[in-house]
Amino acid sequence: MFIVFFFYTTLTVNLNIIAALESNLVPPSQKHLLSPASIPNRIRGSKTAVAIEQSMIMTTWGCKLSLLLLYDKLTFGLSNRYIVKVVTLYVIISFTTMEILYFGVWCRPFNQYWAVPVENDQCATKFNHMIINAIFNMSSDLMILCIPLPLLLACQLPKGKKLILTSVFGLGIFVVSLYFTFLSLHWLNVLSILAAALNKYFSFCDPFSHVWEIWYMREASMAVYVANMPMLWSLSRQLFGLQSFFGRASRPKEAFVDKATINPCKSLYENANPFMGFEANHIDDLGMEDGDTS
């Protein structure tokens, strides 16, 4: 996540820089209006746009990998851990494919990305890249969302606590279209979905507009927020001495745990807690004893 913060900071700085610059994002009907005096400024702005795009990709995909690392820990000892590995492989392949297309296919030669004026509008609008980005972003986020929800829904908890847990771990989805908003009823998740959807909406509907700069910042910020949200409860407990979400239990800490009989709900909590380690004495029965598979 520290690497993600680096690219997120780079994205923020460059978005502030490009706000004072122009770029080669000029409609074909207005290219004849370009003045020689404005070209150096536009070249600098276009180079900054390339840095912004790469920082955005690194931030978004870095958040995905951070969540997948968390989910790999959550599903330790559970039968569906292989799903995390499959989704991780898909995220890596999608990232690699997208970068190969960006650097080697969509705009050749590469310096056309900051040429003024461009010979191919694709180098300025990055339209094909945006389509591939949207497809990989939506599909990978839906996969990430589906990893923890079955385990959470299987927990024998009161509906109120189950809803809270489901909402927290369901925050893994931050770039999907508005058609999937029914998957979450929680304001933070909905805001992240709206930010990403509106970003793509403005990019596709008016590829020569500069409105994308605002929505890149909003989408990236929501991605960082939701990627860190599952960790905040454990950190808050450590800092402020808050009570465990599951309450206290009288059972002593066990020296050995049979992986085949792990309570999935307890496993989610225990494995997700990076600040306190295994705390069996802080977890209640959750409606079934260890080893009870009924």
Image (cartoon, helix red, strand yellow):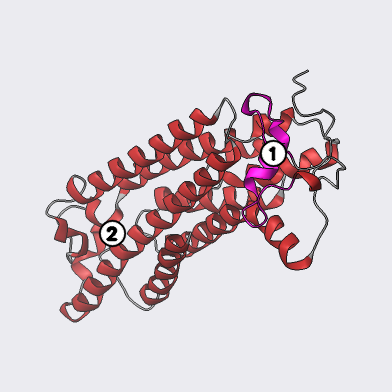
Is there any visible trace of residue 61 in the rendered image?
yes
Give the Cα separation between the discs numbered 2 and 1: 68 Å
The residue furthest top is: 294
Asked whether 186 or 212 is in front, the reply is 186
Residue 212 tag number: none
Residue 259 part of the magenta segment? yes
Residue 124 place in picture, x, y as percent = 26, 57
Q: Residues within 10 Å of mark 1 (few under 14, many from 20)?
A: few
Query: In the visual, does 6 lie left or right of 176?
Result: left
Q: Residue at x 60, y 29 (%)?
A: 78
Q: Which residue is mark 1?
A: 255
Are there few (<14), some (14-19), or many (20+) residues within 10 Å of tag 2?
A: some
Please provide the residue range marked out in magenta.
Answer: 254-279
Q: Name above or below for residue 82 compared with residue 88.
A: above
Residue 177 seen from this side: no
Relative to 11, residue 64 above or below: above
Marks 2/1 in contact by CB < 8 Å: the verdict is no
Dot 2 amino acid type = Pro
Q: How many marks?
A: 2
Q: Is residue 167 above or below residue 36?
A: above
Q: Secondary structure at mark 1?
A: loop
Residue pointed to by mark 2: 27
Of the two numbered discs 2 and 1 in the rendering, the one whose residue sits closer to the viewer: 1
Q: Position of residue 106 (x, y in %)?
A: 21, 46
Residue at image position (35%, 64%) is 52
Q: Measuring 58% from the left and 38% from the top, which residue is drawn there? A: 145
Look at the image and tell me in which quarter the C terminus lies: top right
Q: Quadrant of residue 18?
A: bottom left
| Residue situated furthest left in the rendering | 109
* Residue 266 or residue 186, whichever sits in front: 266
